[in-house]
């Protein structure tokens, strides 16, 4: 009896086992909760974001924090900024309009602080402590990067000179700021990663990124700075040592960095959408989709993707564990945990349970 149990355990642990894949497919199903669990947002959902085990639904003039176990308690809150971009972390919500000059930091449906900037806002982000970093435009292709404490106090200011800052992020545990800049003075753009300690004036690191145009930065991992581009991602340690450099052969459509050392990328290659699971810069597994995919969300070793109305749950071995066909086009998708997926169709948020 013990040998039989051990035999089946080994099969399930074997990544390439057809039997393990079959058994997983049988026991793991995605089901849509009854229609009573759907939430009408009254406006078209712009974004779905995870927020402390719940889902944050952002609309043009309102937002809702929805508990999938108590959808009847969901209440729309009038957003402090209309048609806003929203950055979130640890329950903090940072509202701003691109090319506007006002930021509003909220938490628990209450305003924490309000900030007016001198120049137009290009982008902004908030870290887990509620501290904010803002990129503003100064005279065209120049930028001023501002760091604010969650009480609204300005604690750091850096001017990028003749270069344009494309993205910035602030670590929560080291008071370090990562900024990507782009020089347009040459025949081809030149990108640079700057790493600052906000208690010092000079950068502690400047890294040449070549001619790739940075689109995002991530400092969620304590000792890692991740930079994203239109064709891939790369990561460096704080001393500038390269950890990985991924260049996609196609167009990068979406990505997830829930594990910065194992990025998950959705890439369009020659008309086929491919979901790549990486171990640093090595392709661990890939899933070639027979249909178009646009949306991606991950939680630990699971990923959920969607095209028009089909939602698929895929593990990090690129195995399709479950499929669900929605009645209408899926506009946004968000994986809350290993048990729950939220998705929106127009002005309605619905939930799938993973069983």
Image (cartoon, grey):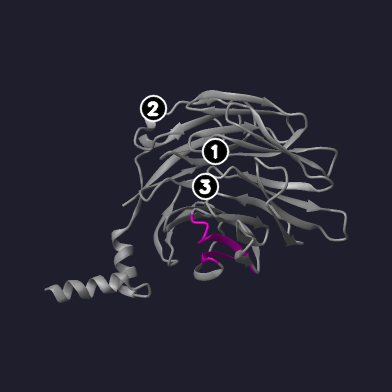
Q: Residues within 10 Å of mark 1 (few under 14, many from 20)?
A: many
Quickly name the residue at label 2.
Answer: 73
> Where, quadrant-wise, is the N terminus in this rendering?
bottom left
SS class of the residue under badge 2? helix
Residue drawn at 54 percent across, 38 percent down: 88
**Above or below for 339 versus 56:** below
**Above or below for 349 versus 299:** above
The majority secondary structure of the magenta stretch comes to: strand
Nearer to us: label 1 or label 3: 1
Q: Disc 2 and disc 1: Cα gap in Å?
A: 21 Å
Residue drawn at 40 percent across, 40 percent down: 53
The picture places residue 89, in percent across and down from the top left corner, at 52, 39
**What number is the disc on residue 330?**
3
Q: Which residues are magenta?
A: 259-280
Residue drawn at 73 percent across, 31 percent down: 100
Q: Disc 3 and disc 2: Cα gap in Å?
A: 23 Å
Residue drawn at 44 percent across, 63 percent down: 316
Q: Quadrant of residue 19?
A: bottom left
The picture places residue 354, in percent across and down from the top left corner, at 35, 51
The picture places residue 90, in percent across and down from the top left corner, at 48, 38
Tell me if I can see residue 289 in this picture.
no
Quickly name the residue at label 1.
Answer: 88
Q: Earlier in the sequence, mark 3 or mark 2?
A: 2
């Amino acid at each position: 009896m013990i040998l039989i149990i051990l035999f089946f355990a080994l099969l399930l642990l074997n990544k390439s086992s057809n039997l393990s894949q079959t058994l997983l497919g049988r026991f793991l199903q995605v089901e849509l909760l009854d229609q009573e669990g759907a939430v009408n947002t009254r406006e078209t959902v712009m974004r779905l974001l995870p927020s402390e085990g719940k889902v944050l639904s952002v609309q043009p003039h309102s937002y809702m924090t929805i508990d999938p176990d108590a959808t009847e308690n969901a209440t729309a809150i009038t957003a402090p900024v209309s048609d806003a971009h929203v950055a979130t972390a640890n329950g903090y919500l940072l509202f701003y309009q691109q090319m506007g000059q006002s930021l509003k930091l909220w938490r628990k449906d209450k305003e924490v602080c309000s900030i007016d900037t001198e120049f137009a806002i290009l982008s902004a982000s908030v870290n887990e402590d509620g501290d904010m970093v803002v990129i503003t435009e100064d005279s065209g292709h120049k930028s001023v990067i501002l760091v604010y404490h969650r009480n609204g106090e300005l604690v750091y200011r850096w001017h990028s000179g003749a270069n344009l800052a494309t993205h910035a992020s602030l670590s929560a545990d080291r008071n370090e700021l990562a900024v990507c800049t782009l020089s347009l003075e040459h025949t081809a753009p030149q990108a640079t990663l700057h790493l600052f300690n906000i208690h010092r004036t000079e950068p502690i690191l400047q890294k040449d990124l070549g001619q790739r145009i940075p689109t995002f930065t991530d400092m969620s991992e304590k000792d890692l700075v991740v930079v994203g581009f239109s064709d891939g991602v790369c990561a460096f340690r704080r001393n500038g040592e390269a950890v990985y450099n991924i260049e996609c052969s196609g167009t990068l459509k979406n990505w997830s960095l829930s594990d910065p050392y194992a990025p998950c990328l959705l890439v369009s290659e020659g008309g086929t959408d491919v979901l790549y699971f990486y171990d640093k810069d090595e392709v661990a597994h890939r899933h070639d989709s027979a249909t178009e995919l646009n949306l991606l969300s991950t939680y630990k070793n699971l990923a959920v993707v969607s095209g028009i109305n089909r939602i698929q749950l895929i593990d990090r071995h690129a195995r399709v564990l479950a499929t669900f066909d929605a009645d209408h086009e899926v506009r946004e998708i968000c994986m809350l945990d290993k048990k729950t997926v939220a998705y929106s169709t127009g002005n309605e948020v619905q939930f799938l349970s993973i069983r």
